[in-house]
Amino acid sequence: MTTQLLMEVRDLVKTFGDGETATKVLKGLNLRLDTGELTALLGPSGSGKSTLLTIIGTLMKPTSGSHTMLGVDLTKADDREVTDFRNRHIGFVFQFHHLLPDFTALENVIFPSAVRAGRETEAMRQRGRELLAEVGLENRIDFKSTALSGGQKQRVAVARALMNKPELVLADEPTGNLDRESATQVMELIGRINTEQQTSFLISTHDEKIAATCRRHVMVADGKVTG
Ligand code: ADP
Ligand code: MG
């Protein structure tokens, strides 16, 4: 399988606030991700991992620096183009699953797509069912999310992130709230999807056992990639 450049940030700077209270969090950070990579993002708490994931996810603009993905210069795109780009190409998994409690597993997986389209379609339901089977929840499709375990909820969140076949999934401490066994299952699932579908994953984690399941490790310290 050939790999190619998927995403690149160069000389990335992010400063929060201004004047006396300005905090420079990213200080000229460089990172390239290729298609099909499985990358752990490591670094002490407060080093800027979540800030970096938020910028790569196009949810926040950098103060300066370049950000390109799939050949598109995302610092130059307007808000509508960026939103459209994000919906098509990037999926998100967070530490807390952010599932809607009154919705079933299937409804949670298709909800973002249904909201964007303004309606729910049979094609969405079909894709959602396939994804839930893919993450091992074929017998939980119509369960309310509140009736699922923590690990199962996070697997629903992974299925939801994959709904639009994104090239890149950003996961911010996705196993931070799970017990060891559930965390291992979620990482096995991510590893399998990465291998089978060539989806690139960038996963921030504090957990060395979790990081060990990733082929590439990127260390962030003092606002830069250090290794
Ligand atoms: P990590 O995810 O590695 O723990 P973060 O990216 O969350 O690090 O935070 C890096 C630094 O940026 C911290 O010092 C944090 O307080 C600061 N920070 C993050 N978001 C904001 C914000 N919206 N306003 C001000 N400071 C922020
Ligand atoms: Mg964080």
Image (tube, rainbow, N blue to C red):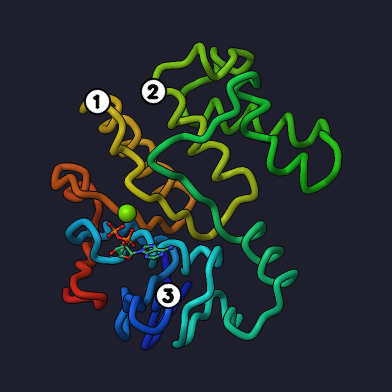
Q: Residue at x 66, y 59 (%)?
A: 88
Nearest to N terminus: mark 2 or mark 3: 3
The quarter in which the N terminus is drawn is bottom left
Task: Look at the picture and state if 107 lies above or below 213.
Answer: above
Query: Which numbered marker is on residue 17?
Result: 3
Tell me whether circle 2 and circle 1 mark residues in contact (CB < 8 Å).
yes
Q: Nearer the viewer, residue 104 or 3?
A: 104
Left or right of 97 in this view: 119: right
Question: Ligand 2 near label 2 (Cβ, under 8 Å)?
Answer: no
Left or right of 125 in this view: 29: left
Task: Look at the picture and state if 147 lies above or below 210.
Answer: above
Question: Ligand 1 near label 3 (Cβ, under 8 Å)?
Answer: yes
Tell me whether circle 1 and circle 3 mark residues in contact (CB < 8 Å).
no
Q: Report which residue position mark 1 lands on.
A: 179
* Disc 2 versus disc 3: nearer the observer: 3
Image spot of residue 68 (x, y percent): 52, 80
